[in-house]
Image (cartoon, rainbow, N blue to C red):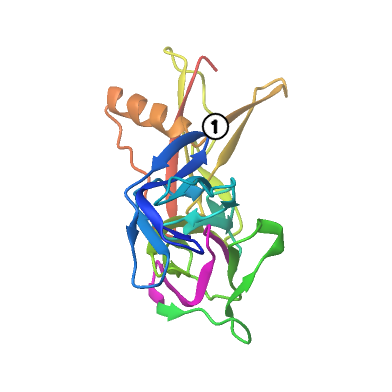
Amino acid sequence: MTLTVGADEPLNTGAITVELTNGATTTVTGFQATDSQNTYEATTTVADADWTATLTQAEDEAGNDGADGKTTSPSVDTSGPSFTLVTPSDDPTTNNSNIDIAIDDQTGVNTNSTYITVEDADGVVLDNARAAPTGSNIEITQNADLGDGSDDLTIDNLDLADGQVNIIVESEDTNGYSNSAEFTYEVDTQVNSGKVVTPSETVYKPMDGTLQVKYNYVDSNVDVVDIKLVDDNGKEDTVTYRERAFTRYKRDCRRHGLPCRRDRQRLPQQRGYLLHDW
């Protein structure tokens, strides 16, 4: 940060003091005369933040102090913008074809310097494409809801293949400092479906109380599996497995010498579970 002090008469360079405050206080001295008449500068290094600069001393050669506590509010920002993936948000799997990224910077975002690359399971969809202020499906706009210095990068109606999506976005702030970020999520537009293939008929409870159930499914992102058991008396019981259950399934499969894998292919796929104490 460079601080400049101006006066209406020559000052004693050894008697100029500015205090920078932002929670803590930094005292700046060592001012030197510039080429401009009665103007003095000093440079110091401080953290990125909003600061308050107060002139606490400004003496002339006779020792008269003209500092009157004048303040200014400089802002330091050398890190470049930060990025937040707004859409899709909490759920890492989505069928949404739109992307929304909030770009935030203390001094403001240079909208002419924002580029984005999007790659889906089939390849590159956008290759370092430049965002336009208006009139494009890759649009960057000032977003008042996000606060000062924040912009909103929206990409509408992308034709994304099911599977993993990788995003790289980069931008500069109004001071020329750049930054980039990477985001990953999954697109899943297929309807959940499943069909039990094992057992294919009525089974009797094994001695160890363990039943192996296999099913085919048409979905690369199965989250919840409900297995309904019906005994000879018509009594029903449902066992629910979630994604984390697959770890237990793999452990049980290996212990029983059974094949266990979960493919990420689209059609067809098969998964199995071992039910204990049924």
**Count of marks overlaid on the render:** 1
Assess whether residue 201 is covered by the magenta stretch: no
Q: In this view, does 257 lie to the left or right of 199?
A: left
Is the stretch drawn in magenta largely helix, strand or loop?
A: strand
Residue 243 pos. (x, y %): 49, 37
Q: In this view, does 144 lie to the left or right of 28?
A: right
Pick the quarter of the image with the C terminus. top right
130 lies above or below 255: below
State the residue in front, 57 or 110: 57
Residue at the spot 52% in from the left edge and 21% down from the top edge: 204
Disc 1, SS: strand
Q: Position of residue 39 (x, y in %)?
A: 42, 65
Q: Which residue position holds label 1?
A: 241
Quadrant where the image shows the N terminus: bottom left
Q: Which residue is drawn at 42% across and 13% down?
A: 208
Which amino acid lies under the numbered mark 1 shown in the image of this protein? Tyr
* Residue 63 seen in render: yes
Magenta span includes 106:
yes
In the rendered image, the residue lying farthest to the bottom is: 135
Q: In this view, does 121 lie above or below 216?
A: below
Q: Give coordinates of residue 179: x percent, y percent.
A: 38, 62
Residue 156: image quadrant is bottom right
- Which span of residues is magenta-colored? 99-127
Q: In which quarter of the image is residue 233?
A: top right
Q: In this view, does 74 lie above or below 174?
A: above
